[in-house]
Amino acid sequence: MTFVVAACCVVGALVAGATFRYGAAAPLAPAPGAVPAMATEDYGRRLIAHTAEMLGPDQSDDALRFTKSRLNCGSCHLATGTEPGTLTLLQVPEHYPRFSGRVGASTDIEDRINECMQRSMNGKPLPKDSTEMIAMASYLRSLGAKYQAMGAGQKQPEEPAAFKTPPRRADLDAGKQVFGDKCSICHGADGAGLLATRDRAKGYLFPPLWGPDSFNDGAGMHRVLTAARFIKARMPLGGPDLTDDQAFDVAAYINDQPRPEMPNLEKDYPDPSAKPIDNPYGPYADDFPVDQHRFGPFAPIDAYYKSLKKAK
Ligand code: HEC
Ligand code: HEC
């Protein structure tokens, strides 16, 4: 008993010290991990905002080390998914359960969270009955009611016109130029991002776009058209102003850089004809080369699948 009290005091002192040092930067009260976790919506929201810190490779409790990237869910689902538009999470409740071509089966919200855990976060799945999964899923379910309550005007995304795929192969050299002009100031010349503090355990202020701390090659963001859609809508953060051509080329340039590899990708999409046209790995239900699935031109692939559907 005495031991428990003493341990509490030590933890308390550490937390107080940490709050003092990072108090200005982190609106996290209480600090993550300081109190026993409960599966509340608020805990779920914090997990989505501070995933690297709470579930990442530097988490002091190794039972909570689930992700190998040092991204947050919120690195892509901006404002923890509460903004309408690209990669919003507001409509998650109305999208599930649904059939997933990638899995080849019906999936629920928990399955979909675990897809991002294993791909975007390069980690392992959370047990469905874990406090962390229940908290994240109940946070996402709570967004459904929030979305319902929004007026038509509020539901309208504040974004540039949606990305339209240029009718050509992406130009990697042009993409490198765009990256240097528009992205490297935050994401770093080497794409490796900028840590939030000197302590890597706190995650990134500007997340890495490639390299060991980024998403893996099985992630949705590793599809050129998905990345280009997000980039055109949201980047540079706070002032998205890229043309379709720039978004396409810079997405391809990022896509061409090294990143963690996901095992068993060939088992995705039991029916390969369900693969999106920009899926960067085979096998495919067509004869177009991998390079064309990665970088385009996409119009011929698109036309091929449309004609198949018509023939059916
Ligand atoms: C590297 C970027 C990235 C990160 C990090 C990321 N996601 Fe995603 N997420 C995506 C993309 C891309 C999609 C697919 C969107 C689509 O299909 O149009 C997606 C889809 C989802 C969906 C389904 C949305 C819907 O309405 O159907 C959920 C739920 C989700 N993510 C949750 C999470 C959670 C929870 C985390 C953290 C554990 C996370 N994501 C981390 C990129 C990311
Ligand atoms: C002003 C700083 C800034 C600039 C400039 C910027 N970004 Fe970002 N970007 C961010 C931040 C911050 C996030 C994560 C958002 C969050 O955590 O709220 C992000 C997230 C991303 C992500 C998803 C997360 C990841 O690590 O993969 C991609 C992809 C991305 N940016 C691409 C770009 C591209 C391409 C450009 C240039 C066209 C660009 N960004 C310019 C700040 C910036």
Image (spheres, grey):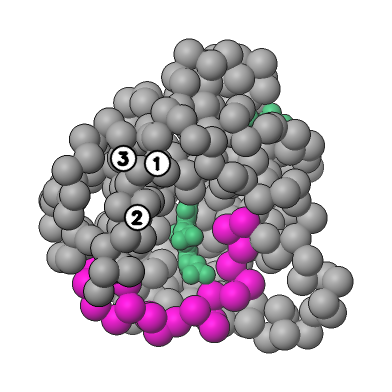
- Find residue 210 and report its image quarter: top left
Nearer the N terminus, badge 2 or badge 1? 2
Does residue 51 show up?
A: no
From this view, report whether residue 77 is shown above or below residue 40.
Answer: above
- Find residue 291 and report its image quarter: top left
| Callout 2 secondary element | loop
Residue 42 located within the stretch drawn in magenta = no
Specify the segment rendered in magenta.
86-108
Disc 2 crowd, CA 10 A, few/some/many (<14, 14-19, 20+): some
* Residue occupying the point 55% across, 70% down: 44
* Residue 110 position within the rendered picture, expressed as x and y whole percent measured from the top left: 38, 76
* Residue 154 position within the rendered picture, expressed as x and y whole percent measured from the top left: 83, 70
* Residue 248 position within the rendered picture, expressed as x and y whole percent measured from the top left: 53, 33
Nearer the N terminus, badge 3 or badge 1? 3
Task: Look at mark 2 in the image and give the residue it sits on.
Answer: 276
* Residue occupying the point 38% across, 81% down: 98
For marks 3 and 1, give the one nearer the viewer. 1
In the rendered structure, the answer to whether residue 192 lies left or right of residue 82 reads left
